[in-house]
Each structure stands twice: as C-alpha cells, then as structure tokens.
Image (tube, helix red, strand yellow):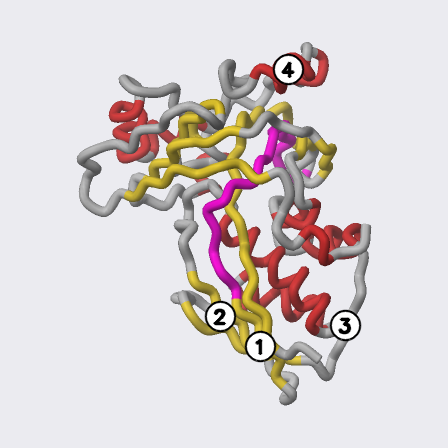
Amino acid sequence: MNTYLNLPAPAKLNLFLHVTGRKSDGMHLLESIFVLIDLRDQIDLEELPSGAIERVGDIEWDVEKDLCWRAAKLLQRLAPQKGCRITVRKQIPHGAGMGGGSSDAATCLIGLNRLWGLNLSRTELMRLGLELGADVPFFIFGQDAFAEGVGEVLTPCPIPDFKALVVFPNVSVPTAKVFGSPDLTRNTKSIRILHFPGLVSAFPLALIGRNDLEPVTRSLCPAVEDAFRLMKPISRPRMTGSGSAVFSAVELGSEVCPLAPLPSGWKQWIVKSLKIHPLSGWIES
C-alpha cells in the first residue's frame, strides 16, 4: 500500500472577474471564469503511523493558519488514527491571485483521500474544500469553470486552448483591503444575460468582460500599475484574481515574448492552459 505521494498543485487564472453584489454577511457575489494553467507547486504527502499532522517546507507562518495543515485536519475527523507529513515546494507566488494556497489545499484533500483510503466523492471533497476557502472547490472540480456565488457555484465552461505571459511584480496584494475599498465596483450586470457562448469561443482573440478588482489593486499597489505599464505596449494585460499577477493571453500557436529586462525580484512565466486537473481522475464524481 502506498505511504508516500508526490503530487502537482496547478495555478489558475481568472479570465475576468465581476463583482455583482454583496451578501448580508459581507461576502461579495462574483462571476468569473477559472482556468487551470501548467505552472504548479509540488506537494509531498507521507503517511505517519503516529497520527500526527506535520507541515514542513515553505511554511513561515502559524501552522494552524496553513491551508494544507487545515485540509489534513478536516479529513482527519473522518480518520482519527491517520497522520501525515506535508511538504510543499512552491512555484506559485503568495498573494499573486493565482490560487496557489487554495490549489495546495485541494491537492492535499485529493491526495489524502486516496492515501488514507477514505473514498470521498468529488462533491464531498468540494464541500470540505469550501470550509477552507472559496477557491478550493474549483481545484477539486478540476476543469475550466464559470463561477458564481462567492466562487463556489461552478459550471463547466470549456475554453479554447491558449498560452499566456504571466508577470509577478514581487508584491503580495492585501485581498481584504481590495474587497473593502469604497472604490470597488459592486454592481456589475450579470454576464449570463449577454451572448456568453460567443464571448467564450472568441477568447483569447477577444477578452471577456473585465476584472472589477483591477482599478483598486492598481491604485493600492504601485508595482501592479508598473506591470501594466511595462506590458501594455506589447500585449493586452489583465490582472488575475485580486492580483498581483498580470497576464496576457494568446492563441496556442502564437508567439509569446517575455519581458526584458524585468525589475529586480520580479518573475515571469510563459504558461499553457490545462483542460483537466492532473489529479481529476483520482476522484469519483
């Protein structure tokens, strides 16, 4: 029986992000398209007979706030005698709007579901993932998706294959501050009433909607504004999530040129879209 797994945790891009309202509890209602890309973290899961949950690797914060540790503790409620050591090797930057922490947590849920022999369904894992964060269910859902609600209501939405230049301006965006800004647009009309299938099929030649968080983030984070300024002459930049990463998407066969030179500490990648999460086949629907 397997006692060790080495697993991928892919990043995501938001092709657009509309804020359509706000719930009574203060949570924002969103519409977006989530797409997986081939930039990924790697997660090592090692079963421990002691029943302890250990988190090692990149962690620089209180372990009880760590999404991977919390994911393991959630599943341990169903298997109290089981334990594991979780090692995360990061490639997706923190605070980039690319879902790195949420993806890591989803991969832990998927991997431990198999390692511990729990056999939970995709729906059950998505329900647990929502306890960790609104983006976690998407990575368990495992395919291009139109997202509604706070991001947890997901509908399959196949997107044409594309590649993209993604630029990370070495700054972590304060997401709560962005969503709390009085300047944030919160009443964008639902895109569902528009010609949605046509908009999707035309991507990436034509961009879909906009990112309502972008103006606030650009005003709060000068480095994000700098990224737009550097990318605009050669591309059609758009921010993903609440930032700080900015991307430019093109058709799969088109050429993508990296920026040169980049400011000190910045990173960039040329990525491809993924139709399906690499671990999607590990879960019973």
Question: Which label was assigned to residue 117?
Answer: 3
Mark 2 vs 4, N-terminal side = 2
Circle 4 — which element?
Answer: loop
Q: Position of residue 159 (x, y in %)?
A: 62, 27
Residue that mark 2 sits on: 87
Give the residue type at disc 1: Glu
> Dot 4: few (<14), some (14–19), or many (≥20) neighbours within 10 Å?
few
Q: Amino acid at mark 4?
A: Lys
Residue 55: image x %, image y %? 50, 73
Residue visible at 71% across and 80% down in the picture: 1
Where residue 28 appears, x then y in whole percent?
61, 33
Q: Secondary structure at mark 2?
A: strand
User: How far apart in space, not on screen, are marks 3 and 4 (Cα)?
Assistant: 45 Å
Q: Is residue 189 left or right of residue 183?
A: right
Residues at marks 2 and 1, CA–CA distance in whole angstroms: 9 Å
- In whole angstroms, how far apart are the C-alphas of marks 3 and 1? 14 Å
**Picture quarter containing residue 32?**
top right
Question: In which image quadrant can residue 244 be found?
Answer: top left
Mark number displayed over residue 121 = none
Magenta range is: 25-43
Instruction: Tell me if residue 207 is in the magenta stretch.
Output: no
State if disc 1 and disc 2 touch (CB < 8 Å).
Answer: yes
Quote the CA–CA distance across marks 3 and 2.
20 Å
Q: Which residue is mark 1?
A: 46
Q: Which is closer to the viewer, label 1 or label 4?
A: 1
Q: Which residue is mark 4?
A: 189
Residue at 51%, 20% (x, y): give it. Answer: 204
Please state which of residues 73 and 256 is positioned toward the viewer in this rendering: 256
Q: Residues within 10 Å of mark 2 (few under 14, many from 20)?
A: some
Amino acid type, residue under disc 3 in the picture = Gly
